[in-house]
Image (tube, rainbow, N blue to C red):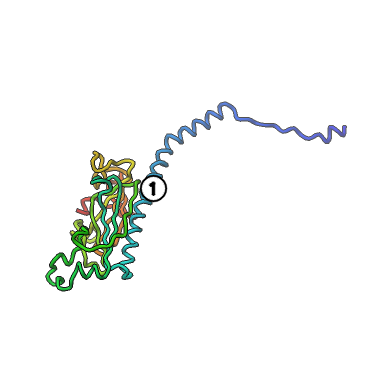
């Protein structure tokens, strides 16, 4: 009797039924079909965005050195990566010392603008520069080949051939497009990175004469370039 009173209750182990396992497998299958493509797109976009902002940070570092007086002027050039083909995004970085600046922009040329006093050239054969090296990424491509000049007072201009959609002023902005290397081809291919190919995972970086940078993301559904909640068509920049 005492043995019966102190006998421990038996545990019941409940296993999944075949129907329950099939339901779980079905749910996982639906998740894979619906959610995985979205997760994959999110990962790709995050990678492209990171690479774009790495380029932006490199430019802002150059700008900070101009602002502090360490550089008299800086220039970055988006250019060919491999034997004339734009395979991946590449940015060449240069700066001028005070002596370089005085050599390239003598005061006597200020009044008339002789020898392009108000403009900076990307060609190191035409102007004296010091190289800071290159910055590149094999995850993204860029378009077009273009250069940016960074001067402390904004007087030295590079290529500014776009309209500022915020002010309506023409030839006050410039831009470069960044695309994912996964869904674009190099410059010799049919699906090149540019501002009109309608591919996803594209970003546009614009700048003004003071090298103030703004990053837009292409919205596939709206077919517009967006920053924060403001979206603009490409025609607003032309």
Residue 56: quadrant of the picture: bottom left
126 lies above or below 225: below
Identify the residue at the far right of this view.
1
Where is residue 151? Give x, y as percent: 26, 66
Q: Is residue 168 visible?
A: no
232 lies above or below 41: below
Who is closer to the viewer here, 142 or 122? Answer: 122
23 lies above or below 230: above
x 36%, y 48%: residue: 48
Residue 221: quadrant of the picture: top left
Residue at disc 1, secondary structure: helix
Marker count (numbered): 1
In the displayed structure, does residue 195 sit left or right of residue 136? Answer: left
Where is residue 34? Give x, y as percent: 42, 36
Where is residue 20? Give x, y as percent: 56, 30
Q: Is residue 135 visible?
A: yes
87 lies above or below 74: above
x 30%, y 67%: residue: 71
Identify the residue at the far top of this view.
18
Q: Which image quarter holds the N terminus?
A: top right
In the displayed structure, does residue 2 sit left or right of residue 76? Answer: right
Q: Residues within 10 Å of mark 1 (few under 14, many from 20)?
A: some
Report which residue position mark 1 lands on: 47
Residue 10: quadrant of the picture: top right
Where is residue 141? Give x, y as percent: 30, 47
x 27%, y 58%: residue: 76
């Amino acid at each position: 009797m005492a043995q019966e009173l102190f006998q421990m209750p038996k545990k019941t182990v409940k296993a999944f039924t075949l129907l329950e396992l099939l339901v779980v497998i079905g749910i996982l299958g639906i998740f894979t079909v619906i959610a995985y493509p979205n997760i994959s797109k999110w990962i790709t976009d995050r990678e492209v965005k990171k690479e774009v902002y790495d380029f932006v940070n490199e430019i802002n570092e150059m700008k900070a050195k101009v602002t502090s007086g360490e550089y008299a002027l800086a220039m970055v050039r988006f250019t060919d990566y491999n034997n004339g083909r734009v395979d991946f995004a590449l940015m060449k970085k240069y700066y001028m010392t005070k002596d370089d600046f005085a050599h390239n922009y003598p005061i006597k040329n200020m009044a008339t603008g002789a020898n392009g006093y108000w403009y900076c050239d990307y060609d190191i054969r035409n102007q004296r520069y010091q190289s800071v090296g290159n910055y590149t990424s094999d995850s993204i491509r860029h378009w077009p080949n273009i250069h940016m000049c960074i001067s402390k007072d904004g007087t030295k201009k590079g290529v500014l051939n776009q309209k500022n959609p915020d002010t309506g002023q023409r030839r006050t902005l410039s831009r470069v497009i960044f695309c994912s290397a996964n869904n674009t081809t190099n410059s010799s291919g049919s699906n090149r990175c540019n501002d009109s190919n309608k591919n996803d995972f594209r970003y546009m970086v614009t700048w003004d004469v003071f090298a103030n940078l703004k990053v837009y993301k292409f919205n596939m559904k709206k077919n517009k370039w967006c920053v924060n909640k403001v979206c603009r068509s490409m025609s607003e920049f032309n």
